[in-house]
Image (tube, rainbow, N blue to C red):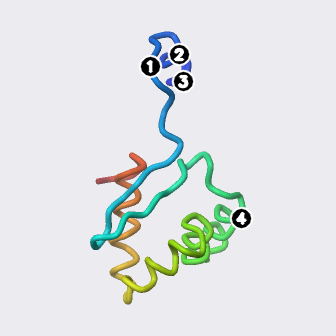
């Protein structure tokens, strides 16, 4: 039985379709991983990590993020924050 089926069977609310993360005092809203734009997945597969992030965040949130992130280490830290929020990878 899938998680969605269990939720329905136990009358639990559906899983959130958006996630919010706080990073450096700013709130970023992310779609669930299953709702990432296909263009973002393609960009990731082509090694265009920042383009993928821009497509996931949207232009306005990306501009906010970019004003806070100035190094590759910043990008890595943000990526780890997102990964933890989405419940994937190592926390």
- Which of the numbered marks, if any, corresponds to residue 39? 4
Residue 23 or residue 27, whichever sits in front: 27
Quadrant that contains the C terminus: bottom left
Whether residues under marks 2 and 1 lie with C-beta atoms below 8 angstroms apart, the answer is yes
Q: Which residue is mark 2?
A: 8
Residue 67 or residue 75, whichever sits in front: 67
Identified at 55% across, 17% down, the residue is 5
Q: Position of residue 47 (x, y in %)?
A: 60, 75
N-term mark: 3 or 4: 3
Whether residues under marks 3 and 2 lie with C-beta atoms below 8 angstroms apart, the answer is yes
Callout 1: helix, strand or loop? loop
Residue 78: quarter of image? bottom left
Q: CA distance from mark 2 to mark 1?
A: 6 Å
Name the front one of labels 4 and 2.
2
Q: CA distance from mark 4 to mark 2?
A: 31 Å
Q: Which residue is mark 3?
A: 4
Q: Is residue 64 above or below residue 15?
A: below
- Which of the numbered marks, if any, corresponds to residue 12? 1
N-term mark: 4 or 2: 2
Whether residues under marks 4 and 2 lie with C-beta atoms below 8 angstroms apart, the answer is no
């Amino acid at each position: 039985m899938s998680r969605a089926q269990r939720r329905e069977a136990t009358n639990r609310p559906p899983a959130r379709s958006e996630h919010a993360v706080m990073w450096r005092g700013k709130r970023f809203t992310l779609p669930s991983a299953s709702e990432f734009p296909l263009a973002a997945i393609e960009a990731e597969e082509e090694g265009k990590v920042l383009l993928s992030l821009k497509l996931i965040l949207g232009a306005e949130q990306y501009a906010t993020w970019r004003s806070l992130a100035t190094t590759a280490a910043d990008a890595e830290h943000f990526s780890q924050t997102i990964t933890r929020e989405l419940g994937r990878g190592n926390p």
